[in-house]
Image: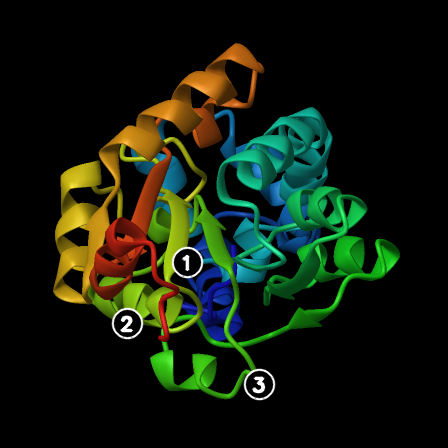
Amino acid sequence: MALAKANGSLDQEVFMKTHLKRILPSPVIQWLKNSSVANRALDTLGPPMKRWARRRMSFNQVYGDDYFEMIDRTSRDSAEVMADSLVSHFSPKSAVDVGCGTGVLLEALRDREIGILEIEKAESALRYCAERKLEVLPLDITRPEEAGQLPRSFDIATSFEVGHQISPESSSPYVAFLTRLSNLVVFSSDPGGDDRLPLNPKPPSYWIQLFAEHGFTFDEAESKTLKRKWEEGAVAHWFSRFPMVFRRMSEIVFLVSGLPCPF
């Protein structure tokens, strides 16, 4: 859930000072500037109006305290099931979560003695990560070169429900960022546009093609196994609906041969 301020807080200020100022009194304008209050008010509107209004808010206003409180509360049980399945299927010693949100998944992995690193920029999410004493880097996930700054690669990279929050033109750089972190990526992105501001709701086939362009192949069998395990474990539907496992194509050759991959 890491993302640069696509619209910027200045757009929000201009919106408040011009369009709404003409029809609403000043106390109401100040009330709406509170992101939690504004989002609760927007939730009463229809989807077109919500999208129109939220496009004029900054990322940290759209995805504020109320959003991450809901994410944290509804993801805790899911994180335990997800961590168990990732460890049992892939046996990682290290993991990085891109757009980690409040850090519930990596906390669960840390409890299983996995070395972890989080990448997140959302201000409200970072407060949860700090409370959990998690190591977080605020990297720009649409700049693949920033992934090259990390001192090591990881056994597994995960990124859940981030792809639909970025702009369409950022999709390829985002995938490039992920593929620089590990030979194994576990990924999901809701194609239905159910999030607060779905800028990029794409079907799984879209992401499979993008990963292929970056040298990764879709592991259909492992993806189906994770989906079944997560559904059986009552994992939140936004994680379990379309989990996708991607492996670097060069690694596949070494997995088949039984030799360790040198990359």
Residue at (85, 61) in percent of width and height: 133
Left or right of 201? Residue 209 is: left
Tell me: residue 260, above or below residue 226: below
Task: Pick whichever of labels 1 and 3 is earlier in the sequence.
Answer: 1
Q: The residue tagged with tag 2: helix, strand or loop? A: helix
Residue occupied by mark 2: 173
Q: CA distance from mark 1 to mark 3?
A: 37 Å
Task: Report the mark closest to the observer, 1 or 3.
Answer: 3
Task: Report the mark closest to the observer, 3 or 2.
Answer: 3
Which mark, residue 151? 3
**Amino acid type, residue under disc 2 in the picture:** Pro
Q: Residues within 10 Å of mark 2 (few under 14, many from 20)?
A: some
Residue at (63, 57) in percent of width and height: 93
Residue occupied by mark 1: 56
Tell me: residue 11, above or below residue 239: below
Q: Nearer the viewer, residue 5 or 259?
A: 259
Q: The residue tagged with tag 3: helix, strand or loop? A: loop
**Amino acid type, residue under disc 3 in the picture:** Pro
Left or right of 257? Residue 9 is: right
**Amino acid type, residue under disc 1 in the picture:** Arg
Residues at marks 3 and 2 touching, judged by CB atoms closer than 8 Å = no
Left or right of 153? Residue 56 is: left
Quadrant including the C terminus? bottom left
Q: Residues within 10 Å of mark 3 (few under 14, many from 20)?
A: few
Task: Pick whichever of labels 3 and 2 is earlier in the sequence.
Answer: 3
Residue 39, position in %: x, y?
57, 40
- Asked if one can make out residue 192 in the rendered structure from this viewpoint, the answer is no
Q: CA distance from mark 3 to mark 2?
A: 20 Å
Q: Nearer the viewer, residue 56 or 175?
A: 175
Task: Report the mark closest to the observer, 1 or 2.
Answer: 2
Residues at marks 1 and 2 touching, judged by CB atoms closer than 8 Å = no
